[in-house]
Structure formats: structure tokens, C-alpha cells
Image (cartoon, rainbow, N blue to C red):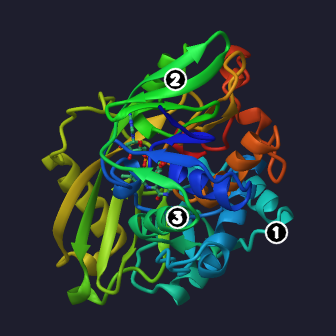
Amino acid sequence: MQTADAVVIGAGINGAATAYNLIKRAGIKNVVLLEKQLIASGGTGRSAAIIRQHYSNEELVRMVKRSVDIFDNFDDEVGGDPGFVSCGWAFLIPESVSNGFGTNIAMGQRLGVDVREISREDLLEIEPRIDLSDVHRIAYEPRSGYADPRAITHAYVERFVDLGGQLWQLTAVQGLIVEGSAVRGVKTDAGEISTDVVVDAAGPWADRIARWAGVDLPLKITREEEIIFETANVGGPPRLCFSDMAKAIYYRPDGASRTLVGRGFPKDYQYVEPDGYNQEVDVSFIAETTERLYARWPSFTRALALNSYTGLYDVTPDWHPVLGRVDGVDGFFLCAGFSGHGFKIAPAIGEIMAEEIIDGAAHSIDIERLNLRRFAAEALIGAAYGSNRA
Ligand SMILES: Cc1cc2nc3c(=O)[nH]c(=O)nc-3n(C[C@H](O)[C@H](O)[C@H](O)COP(=O)(O)OP(=O)(O)OC[C@H]3O[C@@H](n4cnc5c(N)ncnc54)[C@H](O)[C@@H]3O)c2cc1C
């Protein structure tokens, strides 16, 4: 039987970053990364990949701040090009929901994030084409932006393999081997692997993997939709990324000419099964999202949609990830439930998971509150704006 020091299940960005860090930082060579499809074929490959640092909890701010440093110096820190575009990010808030806004900015500043509140006039100097009449307050982060989710996952996997890690693509995990209170291996459709360390980074399928270890991971899967517009003919894409809570949409440049748009909260979530869900984008979504975009960007009314697609969020009861060891199952680690935030924090997640596994506890960032046990203890994590606006 094949043996491994550690097996990571799922080659999305979080599994890839964890596998890489296990070898690079922790020095354990015999690591297997299992992927039932191809790398980045889960939520990662469909991600808007917007990187902003405005969060309600210190853990998330610290994670994304550390990640921005890695995105920014990726070639030195990891190697390769993550497609990071540090174009800036603006958060547009309507009058009705400004609770928590100032507190979050102050916390970000205290933790060293380059963030400040700016006026509508300030923003119009950066991006003069938008109608801000319904916007009450604006947060601005000049160092934030977006990256290429496939490119960065590929870079992590490539470095992992360079360092001696094994990538098994097109290999599905079908069960876990658990003896007493410890994990002892993984059953795949290519045979069994004996190991004392299993990391569940299976995104929308992570609850199934956890069940094989006798662990109840509370996940709901939501179906998300995005549209790409051609905006070369209307003056080019936005000059920065936006989370627009006033119009309940987000948008960002997609290269030099296109604009990526998705719907944010408040909206009706569609809960689905991750296998066989309807991947066709709803006509009503395209119509409504386009209307919201045109209202914010009057000069975009001649911009045509080129492409649209769906993807999945793996959502926990408090819209925060579940990280770290699991009480009662030695050697089983959760790295899942990213609830729509898991791209921007992944570089830090890889480091934290390696610390948790090798050193016994994450130490660069405290993840105690993000452990699975918070659900049984009814210690859910709160957020200033509620749900996915964590
Ligand atoms: C439309 C959309 C927009 C988003 N926008 C943003 C954003 O702007 N900013 C941000 O930070 N985040 C965003 N997110 C969220 C972010 O993309 C995800 O949280 C993150 O990519 C999840 O990565 P992951 O590695 O945890 O999981 P995934 O990418 O889902 O990877 C899990 C992998 O596990 C594999 N797998 C599952 N079961 C098995 C098995 N049995 N055996 C082997 N392999 C298995 C899957 O095939 C998959 O490749 C968005 C997500 C979507 C869908």
C-alpha cells in the first residue's frame, strides 16, 4: 500500500497552498495532494478573486493582510505569477447599513491595513464614470485588487511538485480509514494510502469527507452566478475593484478590456447539491444584474455581456471557515467552509494549516475561534453587516 506523511484532499487554492506549505515550511516531503477532477475545478476556478481587507473580525483581517503581502511578493515567496493586480478596492455603503463600517476601518488601520474613508469627490477623481448618488460612505484600500485564481493555484501546485510532492489528479477519495480515534488512511479510486494526517480541503464536498471520519461539518452549498461584459467600447473596465453594497453587486476589471460582475447580499440564496446542479445562468439574474450595473455606470449601457457562468460557495452557519484539528479524530484537519471568502485568504491559510499540523497549533494567526467546536458551543462568529458580508 502507498504510504504518505500527509494527504491533502482537494486541489483548490486552499488545498494547494496547504500542500505546498507542508513541504516548504514544515519540511515533510511525502505529501500527496488528491483531486477528483483537475486543479482549481471547484469554487476556485469560478472565483471573482477580489482581494479586499475590510472584515469584521481580526482573524480574517490578519489573514488577508498576510495574503496581500504574499500576493504582492509571490515570485519571491512562492515562485511564479499569481496574476495579482493591485488596482485598489472601494466599498460603497448606502445610508441604511453603515453600522460597523467605521469600526471595521479603525480595526484594519490598527492592524496595519492601508485603508481609509474617502469622500465621493475623492472617488470620482480616481474613477469619474460612476453615479454615486445613493452612496453614503466609501472605504478605499489602494493595495487591494484581484488575482488569477487558476494561475495562483497552478503556481502552488507546481512548486509543491518541484519540492517532491505528489499530485494525483482525476483521483477521487471514496472513504477514510479510521481506527479507534485516529485517522489511518484514505481510500481512493486508485487504491488506498496509509497516512496519519488527512486535510479535508474539499470545498463544497468537504462535509462528505468529514462524515467518513464521523464528523458533522455543517455546510450549505449555494449556487452563485457571474457575468463578464466587454467594456473596451465604453471607455474600458472600472479602474479598481468594487464591493457595492448600495446596489448589491460587485465588479472589477477583468484584464484590460472586460468587466466581471456578480451579485452580493442582500439576495435570495439558491441552495443546491454540489453534484449535478444547474450550471446554466438564470435569465433573470442577467437582466437584474445588468440593470444594477448600468444604474451605477451610466456610460456602460452599450456594454454587452460576453459570458456568464455559475460556481459554488461552501457556506457555514456563520459564514466563516472551519479550520484546524477536530476533537476526537486524531490526524484529521478541516480547511473548508470558506463561505465565499476563501480566495483572498488562501496564501495565509496554507501557512496556518502547516503550523497547525506540524507544530500542534497555528501560531502566526490565532485560529482557535474558527475551530469546528464553535458550533456545538454555540459560539458562532458575528459580523458587522451579517452573512456573507463578514
Ligand atoms: C462565483 C464565486 C465568486 C467568488 N468570489 C470571491 C472573491 O471575490 N474573493 C474571495 O476571496 N473569494 C471568492 N469566492 C470564494 C473562493 O473562490 C472560494 O472560497 C475558494 O476558491 C475555495 O477554495 P477551496 O480550495 O477551499 O475549495 P475548492 O476550490 O472548491 O476546491 C475543492 C476541491 O476539492 C475537490 N474534491 C472534492 N471532493 C473530492 C474528493 N472526494 N476527492 C478528491 N477531490 C475532491 C474538488 O474537485 C475541488 O477541486 C468566490 C467563489 C465563487 C464560486
As helix, strand or loop, the secondary structure at mark 3 comes to helix
- Amino acid type indicated by mark 3: Tyr
- Amino acid type indicated by mark 2: Ala
For marks 1 and 2 on the same chain, the one whose residue lies earlier in the sequence: 1
Q: Residue furthest top?
A: 180
Q: Is residue 89 left or right of residue 253?
A: right
Residue under label 3: 156
The Cα atoms of the two marked residues, 1 and 2, are separated by 36 Å
Q: Is residue 134 left or right of residue 288?
A: right
Task: Report if residue 12 is visible in the image.
Answer: no
Q: Position of residue 210 (x, y in %)?
A: 51, 23
Q: Is residue 360 above or below residue 186?
A: below
| Mark nearer the viewer, 1 or 3 | 3
Residue under label 2: 210
Residue under label 1: 112
- Amino acid type indicated by mark 1: Gly
